Amino acid sequence: MYFFIFKDLEEQRQWKDYLSELDNLESYIYNNEKEFSEYIKNYDNNIAVFGISSDFFLHQCPGIVETIKKSRPLAEFCIFLTDSENPISFKYLIKNNIYHVLIKPNEEEDYVKKFYRERFAVTIKKIANREKININDYISPDTKVFSEEVSNSEQKEILIKKLEDLIKGDGEEVEFFKQRVALLADEMLENALFGAPKTDVGNNLFKKGDARSTLNKEKIIFFYAYDGKTLTMEISDNWGSLLPNTVLELLEKNNNGDEVDFETPGGRGFFIMSRFFDLFHVIIDPGKETKVGGHLLMNPNFDPMNKKGFHIQVQKN
């Protein structure tokens, strides 16, 4: 069961199509805190994921997550923005350990709507079942997934060339798409090679930009797939050194008007991901594995300045 809380009927209407592939979806129009507290306390059905409108919790009910957790301590949460012009409250996400944000795109193209509708449904179901997001969840069954083990920093240009060669066609739209792919792949590889390896006290083992080979027992794998419209990429390392709140703190600096943080390891990378992926995800198995990836839709209306949704999953040992 998925329980989405909207600020009004108009907001519910705007999300109807994008959430249409979710079975067992309960919608609730928020009125006041007392009424909601009684309703949710006496609600019999099991709820795996609560979707909460960003438009109302910031102003009307900032304590709604605490209210829900009193009766549903194991529930997962995602915040959704109906108007992408509104800010994301990363401080609220950090305070309440919320790692999922959906943003309704301002799109009229049917294939773009289908892209988001399918990915919203897949991801929310995975969150509900506490399953890892996987590259195979976002591509059609007949699309080939390529995997390349990265053994040294010299492979970066070779991998980027392979990605560019997958994308056929000419014109400005295709060229811009290739540029997005190359930029993201470059940052993902840089982060895995130079940001992930840490000493026991959390310092970087390698300086960004240096030539290096992977260490004994270190494993970096780059996955990618392209179906003609959507390119999906994911990179994994076996350090598991990234912290979820570190991601949120970097995103806050990069998206809410502060100066972009290029000095903190991963700062530039997460800035690029937050602008050039259509939707991106981070999966952390502490001390064992980190996966970072996302999806790019070839869309002539793509705007890097628009906010992008994201999902951060932390595997519980």
Image (tube, helix red, strand yellow):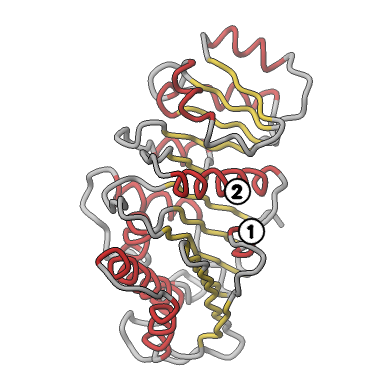
Does dot 2 land on a helix, a strand or a loop? Answer: helix
Q: Counting other residues with Cα less than 10 Å from the Cα at mark 2, is it few (<14), some (14-19), or many (20 or more)? A: many
**In the rendered image, which quarter contains the C terminus?**
bottom right
Tell me: residue 66, above or below residue 218: above
Image location of residue 138, percent across then percent down: 59, 58
Q: Name the residue under label 2.
A: 123
Lateral position of residue 314 relative to residue 82, left or right: right
Q: Counting other residues with Cα less than 10 Å from the Cα at mark 1, is it few (<14), some (14-19), or many (20 or more)? A: some
Image location of residue 246, percent across then percent down: 43, 55
Lateral position of residue 308 relative to residue 143, left or right: left
- 260 or 129, nearer to the observer: 129
Mark number displayed over residue 137: 1
Image location of residue 43, percent across then percent down: 73, 17
> Amino acid type of disc 2?
Thr
* Residue at 49% in and 68% down: 233
* Residue at 43% in and 40% down: 103
Q: Do the residues labelled 2 and 1 touch (CB within 8 Å)?
A: yes
